[in-house]
Amino acid sequence: MAKELTPEEQEKEVKGTIGGDNPFYLGVRDKLNAQGCGMCLAKWTQVTIHFHTGRNHSCHHPNTHPIPVHEVKRNPSALHNTLYKKRRRREMLTGKRPKECDYCWNVEDNSNEYSDRIYKTSESWSRPFYKEIVDTPWNEDYFPKYVEVAFSNICNFKCSYCGPSFSSQWVIESEKHGAYPTTDGFNGIEWMRDSGQLPIKHNEYNPYVEAFWKWWPDLYHNLHTFRMTGGEPLLSKDVWKVLDYIETTDDPNRMLKLSINTNLGAEDRLIDKLIEKINRIRGENRVEEFVIFTSVDGWGKQAEYGRHGLEFNRFWNNIYKILSKCPTVSIGIMSTYNALSVPSYPTLIKNVYDFKKEFGSTDRDWVSSLFLDASYLRHPLHQTIQVLPTDEFSPLVKKQGELAKDYKEVFHQDLNKQGVSYGYTDVEIGKLTRLYDWMVAPQDEQQLITNRKNFYRFFNAHDERRGTNFVKTFPEFEEFYYKCKELNG
């Protein structure tokens, strides 16, 4: 077994080799495999709970599974500790590989790379609890350390790649117009209604939210990370109830890493209320850190088209307002990089850098003030960057990675001899440069034709339903758009 590394050595190794000879990850893998070849601590330590659909999963790779109402009525912690999940834990503890975790088995069986079970187990919210977990009987309840929750799907946006499960605005549109005329019937909701998975409305009784508030006082003190998402969480009364609890409790969990995913498109009074909550909670050291995750996929009018409901200038001003008024908060811009991102993304890269430069300071040495996380869209297929002609558009994507390198993080000395670091980190640059590699990867030709047919079908219907104008907003795509139209005959 590989030797244990100091935290400093671990950081150095993690930033270095990622393949099969990395000593830190090799040690984690060997320790897991000593218990069983399918062992992964995330089945215990991590959970994402969708209260509006009554489903959860531990790790983003397996599909969500239903949480039986009768289980949470009897045991509120079944929001995480379902009987279904406990059976998967038993498989892991007894040397089996749960079928739902096949993403990791495919990686491990077909490459020399470490799978996500190694990376997730290596996290600070997992790795310290290895012995505690393996010594716990499979059928006992366990407090998760990393919890992400969506109290409802209430939302003021209906982003082009999103859907009814995560946006109440999408539910309204899909009920009115039905599925989009793509070959896969994009965002039709009949199957959700027929299978009982239509989201519970935010103003209706929800047995899962009821169970959460029974579980919360005990869960809270066992948490490492708590992340609230949606929908748009600032429109959820339960999100504010969580913040009120953390702000007023006599026994705060001061080690908690707290974060919220918000589109920053809520009305001004809610943005101002959030700022007040952050400053009180952080000012009294009630949490270790507070991170705001927000989203934008391009710049200006093109960003507004893809994220319907976005008022871009207001969004950008809200980022500035929060960075200005909350000196201990960090903001992460999570870009779902898609075909519509390509033309305007360089402007976003430049303006994020300008904010990094302005707000980089020693007050924020515990975490970057602003970071850009570009992850490529995989679904729906008709809107990924792979749908675009690579000879014309892949050079633009490649240049964007190079642009970020031009703004690489550097260390400066200010007039007071204090260190100031700003610019793009290697991690941020790596996310941008891999976009090109994925875009030019080989594709099935027939599937590509179908995706391009659907590109036109979707955005043509989008314009008809929402009063938008694709070609006017994206003149760079005019020729491609009409070629996609011709494919439909």
Image: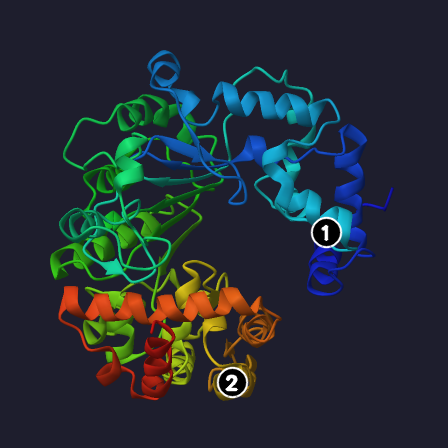
Q: Is residue 314 left or right of residue 131?
A: left
Q: Residue furthest front?
A: 489
Report if residue 369 is visible in the image. Answer: no
Residue 407 numbered mark, or none: 2
Q: Nearer the viewer, residue 273 or 348?
A: 348
Q: Residue furthest top?
A: 74
Which picture quadrant has residue 271?
bottom left
Residue 113 versus residue 132 in the image, above or below: below
**Which mark sits nearer the N-terminus, 1 or 2?**
1
Identify the residue at horizontal 49%, vertical 86% (top origin). 396
Residue density around tag 1, few if under 14, some if 14–19, many if 20 or more, within 10 Å: some
- Place of residue 29 in the rendered image (x, y in percent of width and height, measured from the top left): 76, 42
Residue 114 numbered mark, or none: 1
Q: Is residue 337 left or right of residue 20?
A: left
Q: Nearer the viewer, residue 56 or 26?
A: 56
Residue 260 versus residue 424 in the image, above or below: above
Q: Amino acid at mark 2?
A: Tyr
Which picture quadrant has residue 370?
bottom left
Q: Amino acid at mark 1?
A: Tyr
